[in-house]
Image (spheres, rainbow, N blue to C red):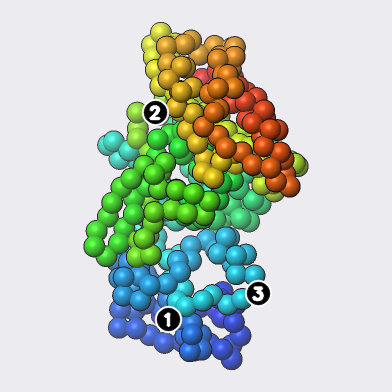
Amino acid sequence: MAFVSPLEVGCTNAQASYTNSESGVARMVLGARHLYLKPKTLDEAVSLLASSGGQILAGGTDFYPALGEQLPAGRVVDITSLGEIRGISFESEQIRIGGLTTWTDIIRTPLPHCFDALKAAAREVGSVQIQNRGTVAGNLCNASPAADGVPPLLALDAEVELVSGTGSRRLPLAQFITGNRKTVRRPDEILAAVLVPRGMESASSAFLKLGARRYLVISISMVAAVVRIDEAGLVAKAGVAVGSCSATAQHLHDLERDLVGLPLTTGIGSTVKPEHLSVLSPIDDVRATAAYRRDASLTLVQRALEACVGNR
């Protein structure tokens, strides 16, 4: 059994005792109310969730700050040992990003240009230390309106793969996140992978983020654009998504349709009109007013499309 430090779950040595299970899952009992479980395989993990429930711990970069000074309530299922769902692989029809893939993995892995936006977003996910620990699945399941990874994956028409003890299911990322901190993931499911269709590999992409400072910032607005052209240099398909301006990041479907057939040349940003952003519902908060967010988003979308021209 792998040794698990009590510090990993915020308790003292006096509070913790260690046990072995028949399946070889590492367990740490935290008094009468808490149990720490560390499965070694995906099958073990989903079996534990099905039988006993619990909170999933992946990178921990959102999990622990949310606790404050409290201990986790109930069981914690630590999935950090599930190497089978970490890494990036190229399949016949899709590129599979394992749920436990870190943002540093995204940055360092050679990927087609359509992933340039996702790589740029990865560099904006907190500090380097956070990028080393934070996972793609955690970013999506946390479902913050300001989650950096969501707009680039939306623009790529990504799907998520959810695995439970009864099987797996796939659904578009746009349907997975339903609101502020809300997803359709069931308590017995693990987000095992993000699936990106290979049809956009030749596309250029860009990600832009606006905040009150340059580094370690929660965004006022952020935009991802992915544009694929045909042999004549005309836009064949476009994906544009805006985050931090609604409860969930939003596809700009009307703009995507209007871009098709246009030459991907300097000046394409002028295609973007205020009505293309009508699906956004920005709010006033400590970072910006709703009106500023809407105006800034218009400019960011225009600049992101111009950046795609330069990234061809």
Question: In the figure, is residue 29 to the left or right of 93?
Answer: right
Q: Position of residue 16 (x, y in %)?
A: 53, 87
* Mark 1 lies on residue: 27
Q: Which badge, 1 or 2, is on the more N-terminal residue?
A: 1
- SS at circle 2: helix
Question: In the figure, is residue 43 to the left or right of 9?
Answer: left
Mark 1 to mark 2 CA distance (whole Å): 43 Å
Mark 3 to mark 2 CA distance (whole Å): 45 Å
- Nearest to the eye among marks 3 and 1: give it: 3
Q: Position of residue 308 (x, y in %)?
A: 54, 22
Q: Position of residue 237 (x, y in %)?
A: 40, 21
Query: Which three-letter amino acid code belongs to the residue tagged 3?
Result: Glu
Q: Are marks 3 and 1 in contact (CB under 8 Å)?
A: no
Instruction: Give the residue at the far top of this rendering.
Output: 232
Q: Are marks 3 and 2 in contact (CB under 8 Å)?
A: no
Badge 3: few (under 14), some or many (20 or more) residues near its Cα, within 10 Å?
few
